[in-house]
Image: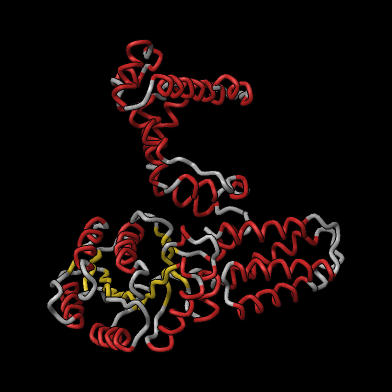
Amino acid sequence: MFDSLSEKLQATLTDVRGHGTLTEADINSAMREIRLALLEADVNFQVVRSFTSAVKERALGADVIGQLNPGQQVIKIVNDELTALMGGEGEEIAFSPRPPTVILMAGLQGSGKTTATAKLARYLREQHGSSVAVAACDVYRPAAVEQLIQVGQRAGADVYEQGTDRDPVQIAAWARDRAQSEGKDVLIVDTSGRLHVDQELMRELADIKRAIRPNAVLLVVDAMTGQDAVQVAEQFGATVDFDGVIISKLDGDARGGAALSVKAITGKPIMYASTGEKLDQFERFHPDRMAQRILGMGDVLSLIERASEAFDEDQARELERKFRKQEFDLDDFLQQMRQIRRMGPLQNLLGMIPGMGKELRGVKIDEREFDRIQAIILSMTPEERRRPELIKGSRRLRIARGSGTNVQAVKALIKQFEQMRKLMKVVASGKTPDLQALMRAAR
């Protein structure tokens, strides 16, 4: 995400960092490059002008000009202002003291609203332990109700629906009463969208809002539409007040115009972001972390949070014991690989490591390699997984056929695994491993 903007900003700031001292001319030049990068990223013109003015004003202060390390100061200023531009402190849904907390979802058709409804339901269930129901009030779009039934059930939410023959206002009121009677913590109401903002859409949203008195109204905007998304948010804000924004399809947005403009234009915070197609690729939006990722500083906090969610503490202790006792086998390796996959796409995870975003630019990681490795391991017998040194000749051929791969792939996996075990043995003994020698041996 934000690849194009991130590349340009990092290049400009790398040049700034290379100066021993900075003059006003240097700062003006850097501001021109930043301004162009933001405009090319489809950031609102007024937002760009305000942003660059704020950065320039601070950069021309006595704390930068003439200092021994002015480049670092400028980078810090850009990071601070990017964070402020996207909202400063991250915000989230405030739960009602009297359940259910009712959330009304709004947005145009095609913005990803129904999928975002299911993703939010899963997020609240997983992160807050909430019992969640979703209400199908989009009675106009073909198959919208059926779509919510499918994704809602996959998200672990109860789906309240009455088909497409009833008035959506009546369905919403009925769903609210049912959620209350069933003791649900949260009710999320999925509403209909249009291809554009119109009076009919706004009138229906206003009627539903009056009928159910939601605790929060969330607007779903498609990040890939850039400035159009910001204009939609502005129009919704002028007619139907909303409390926060969910940015959908953020993983497909190489520019970043919507995420960088919407808070400044509407005054409403981005609360959540959809970062992939899967239901678990949905997260709370942290402006400070996003700014760091844009500037190539990584996002270690989010990486740690994902790891803590994916890895079981008892399993981690048992794995540590196996490392020390030299009992780590291919079953353990497969288990660890599956846990890493639960953290999200590997490309995204590596991008959270400081400095890795730039290194990975243009590199495509084939996630299917995980599937091939899993197929090979699952084609082994339990004894072969415990003792891979047994796998020779006819065993390799059997495993290759069973996994739909070839003998070379089986040999390569076993060789790499053996090198990993050697590395673990050296580390467990307290010695410093010769990584270069191990890498040469693994080739």
User: Which residue is at a point 24% across and 61% down the rendered structure image?
Assistant: 152
Q: Residue 20 appears in which quarter of the rendering?
A: bottom right
Q: Does residue 19 lie above or below 270 as drawn?
A: above
Q: Residue 118 appears in which quarter of the rendering?
A: bottom left
Task: Tell me residue 98's x, y (percent).
Answer: 27, 76
Q: Quadrant where the C terminus lies?
A: top right
Task: Tell me residue 365's x, y (percent).
Answer: 49, 42
User: Which residue is at a point 46% across and 74% down the rendered structure image?
Assistant: 229
User: Which residue is at a point 46% across and 82% down the rendered structure image?
Assistant: 234
Residue that extends furthest to the top in the rendered view of this protein: 393
User: Which residue is at a point 72% across and 60% down the rendered structure image?
Assistant: 12
Task: For residue 88, say whether it is visible.
Answer: no
- Answer left or right for 181 relative to 249: left
Q: Residue 221 appears in which quarter of the rendering?
A: bottom left
Q: Which residue is at the front of the view, 298 or 90? A: 298
Task: For residue 171, say whether it is visible.
Answer: yes
Task: Tell me residue 383's x, y (percent).
Answer: 31, 17
Q: Which residue is at the front of the view, 342 or 252? A: 252
Q: Which residue is at the front of the view, 218 or 184? A: 218
- Answer left or right for 438 relative to 153: right
- Answer left or right for 340 relative to 136: right
